[in-house]
Amino acid sequence: MRVLLVGGGGREHALALGLASDPAVTQLIAAPGNPGIAEVAELRAVEPTDPVAVAALAVETGVDLVVVGPEAPLVAGVADAVRAKGIAVFGPSGEAARLEGSKAFAKDVMTAAGVPTARAYTCTDPESVARALDEFGAPYVVKNDGLAAGKGVVVTDDRALAEDHARECGRVVIEEYLAGPEVSLFVVTDGEAAVPLLPAQDFKRIGDGDTGPNTGGMGAYAPLPWAPSDLVDEVMRDVVHPTLAELRRRGVPFSGLLYVGLAMTANGPRVIEFNARFGDPETQVVLALLETPLAGLLHASATGTLVEHPPLRWRDGAAVTVVVASPGYPGTPRTGDVITGADRPGVIHAGTARRAGDGELVSAGGRVLSATATGPDLAAARDAAYELVRGIGLAGSQHRTDIAAAAADGQVEIPG
């Protein structure tokens, strides 16, 4: 199988490693990729959000499967353009990707499907914003209605900050706050059949103890030793299958990766958000534990044959990833700093580039690397991940020191 992977971040490097290790993959092409992905794939230049260009590249390279990594190309309709060429593609249509592209659309689908989620209002002016904030009270949850690279959500007790974020975004969804630990559940689907992967937890805020502004994610771990044994079955029954059925009813079946972001509240799991692609950095830990060949699983989703796919196999133990970020992130990151120690197994590239002239590896984004390790348990995987972090050289870099610490110590509690 010849595979084209679209994207160039940490999620795509993790996907590339999984695809390259699948014996069925005879050639892996990544566009545009990154220096880490270049170690396992042939890189090609393309603008990922240009449907015509991506479809043309898929035809030119004669691939059997296209895997679209990031959300922006999916919302732009890249999967539609590739499908129109008769090539199998893992990823939803542009219309179905509105589950992530529009928080208001996602809320409308959830309401119609009876999915347990937070009460919410879509607001477009200061008056409606004020009414929603008054009704729900603090902590205030204000979400940009559109794509914002994981940084469009503000959760704060500061009323002025909440109002400022709403004004900057223009169109927002304001929700009641859901108290409880968060869970990310990835579900591979072909629109009808649906296969859950291992639940994971990520860490959104920049600082230890969940302090500071939201980011795209500063680390993650899997599995979740504190999660109820019936969690996945409950979410599949009450969230995933009703959502897929509602989308089919609307004539926009969802095929690809449905990411369910949950809060484990005193009243049970509640959906915080849907995404239309693998999460970053949760992908790094989930795929590190997946023993089933990845390309075959994604191809089954893309070709509508998921019901025939054998049950997934998982490695024993746990996985932890710690994100190393540039100084200034999640604001304006400093880039162009030389990186050392990024060539070891487990170091996944996100915001890296080769410097023109001397080919040195340098930082090229906010989240630069993910140090990912496995172990027989969470404590061992955590120790191994931080050992990788200590071997990375990047001037002024920042990382959290508490990724998976509470879970490893058995201190994660579900309210109620």
Image: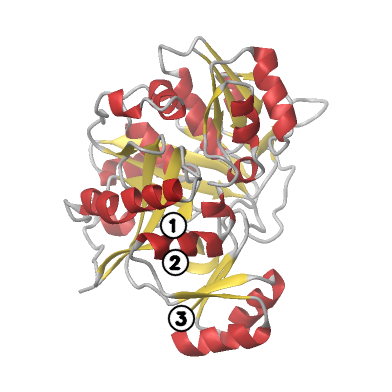
Of mark 3 and mark 1, the one earlier in the sequence is 3
Q: Residues within 10 Å of mark 1 (few under 14, many from 20)?
A: many
State which tag comes first along the sequence, 2 or 1: 1
Measured in 3D between alpha carbons, the distance from the residue under mark 3 to the one under mark 1, in whole angstroms, is: 18 Å
Residue 3 rendering spot, x and y as whole percentages: 54, 19
Lateral position of residue 298 relative to residue 168, left or right? left
Mark in the foreground, 3 or 2: 3
Instruction: Please report the residue visible at 24 percent of the width from the left and 72 percent of the height from the top.
Output: 266
Kind of residue at badge 3: Pro
Query: What's the residue type where badge 2 is placed?
Result: Asp
Q: Which residue is mark 1?
A: 203
**Foreground residue among 51 and 199:** 51
* Closer to viewer: mark 3 or mark 1: 3
Residue 387 seen from this side: no
User: Looking at the picture, does residue 210 appear above or below residue 242?
Assistant: below
User: CB atoms at circles 3 and 2 under 8 Å apart?
Assistant: no
Q: Is residue 7 left or right of residue 248?
A: right
Q: Earlier in the sequence, mark 3 or mark 2?
A: 3
Q: What residue is at 66 percent from the left and 27 percent from the top? A: 31
Q: Which residue is mark 2?
A: 210
Q: Nearer the viewer, residue 299 or 151?
A: 299
Q: Secondary structure at mark 2?
A: loop
Disc 1, SS = loop
Residue 107 relative to residue 366: left or right: left
> Mark 3 — residue?
139
Q: Amino acid at mark 1?
A: Phe
Q: Quadrant location of residue 385?
A: top left
Q: Position of residue 244 (x, y in %)?
A: 39, 47
Instruction: Measure how far apart labels 3 and 2 are at the Cα level.
Output: 14 Å
Foreground residue among 64 and 137: 64
